[in-house]
Amino acid sequence: MSENIKVFLETLPVMAKGMAGIFVVMFIIFLSIKLLNSTFKVEKEK
């Protein structure tokens, strides 16, 4: 059982890098959407 815990603790940094990568990509997509929305504004009709 201690071998499983060792392996789990060795994989935590890899998992953390993957999670960080996901959040970085989501933030980049969010910024690109905001940039596109501010660049191509559509005027609303009343």
Image (tube, grey):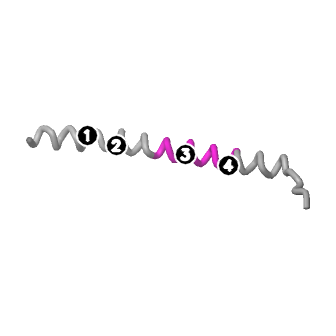
**Which callout, 4 or 2, points at the residue further toward the start of the chain?**
2
| Numbered tag placed on residue 31 in the rendering | 4
- Count of labels shown? 4
- Magenta part mainly helix, strand or loop? helix
**How far across and down, in percent of the image, does residue 42 sit?**
86, 51
**How far across and down, in percent of the image, does residue 38 sit?**
80, 52
Picture residue at 38% right of the left edge, 45% below the top: 16
- Is 28 left, or right, of 14 in this rendering? right
Give yes or no for residue 24 being in the magenta stretch. yes
The range drawn in magenta is 20-32
Q: Amino acid at mark 2?
A: Pro
Q: Nearer the viewer, residue 30 or 44?
A: 44
**Which callout, 4 or 1, points at the residue further toward the start of the chain?**
1
| Numbered tag placed on residue 10 in the rendering | 1
- Say whether marks 4 and 1 touch (CB < 8 Å): no
> In 3D space, how far apart are the residues under numbered discs 2 and 3 (Cα atoms)?
16 Å
- Is 39 left, or right, of 4 in this rendering? right
**How far across and down, in percent of the image, does residue 27 sit?**
59, 48
Please tell me whether mark 2 or mark 3 is closer to you in this view. Answer: 3
Q: Which image quadrant for residue 28?
A: top right
Seen in the picture, residue 11 relative to 41 is either above or below; the reply is above
Residue receiving disc 2? 13
Q: Amino acid at mark 4?
A: Leu
| Numbered tag placed on residue 44 in the rendering | none
